[in-house]
Amino acid sequence: MHPLQMSLMPRWPALLGILLPLPLWASDAINVPSGQAVTLLEAVSNVPGNSGPALRFRFLAPAIARDGGNIDAETAGSDMDHLCTTFALKNLPEDDPKPAEIIISLSDRDVPLGEDDPEATQFFNSYRIEDGACQWEMF
């Protein structure tokens, strides 16, 4: 098994020598309520958030595609709530300070963080961590 590599924003952790392992598999499918196939692309730490430093979990979700996809925004939102609760909270880094916020993103294709792809379908949800639970907040 390979540990997931969590990077600092932007994507230059190898240059800095700062890689934070998490006990996850980046290539394994993750079960979500809609039944769509979702896989983790990456986890990025110290992303600016609404309430301070955030931890972003980026997922590949081809079924949200405008053309040929069958998952709408509302259904994707429920999947992101589920990913925050069942995946992100369970995979917070042990050695780092806990983030003030978790950002979950779904994309129908791998779009590098910070880059624009007008053809891509992407959804984002932001959550604050309150009493060990994900609480949705405006992004």
Image (cartoon, rainbow, N blue to C red):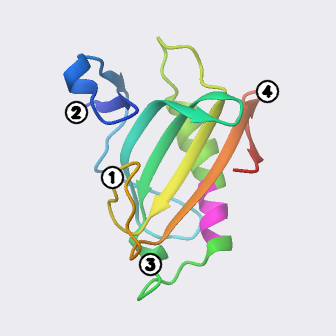
> Quick one: label 2 or label 4, which is nearer the N terminus?
2
> Quick one: label 3 or label 4, which is nearer the N terminus?
3
In the rendering, which numbered label is found on residue 103? none
- Which image quadrant for residue 53? top right
Give the distance between the C-alpha atoms of the residues marked 1 and 4, in whole angstroms.
32 Å
**Left or right of 51, for residue 124:** left
Q: Secondary structure at mark 3?
A: loop
Query: Which segment is the magenta one?
Result: 75-80
Q: Residue at x 42, y 35 (%)?
A: 44
Q: Position of residue 49 (x, y in %)?
A: 63, 35
> What kind of residue is marked 1?
Pro
Give the distance between the C-alpha atoms of the residues marked 3 and 4, in whole angstroms.
34 Å
**Left or right of 82, for residue 117:** left
Circle nearer the viewer, 3 or 2: 3
Report which residue position mark 1 lands on. Answer: 112
| Vertical arrangement, residue 3 with respect to residue 109, above or below | above
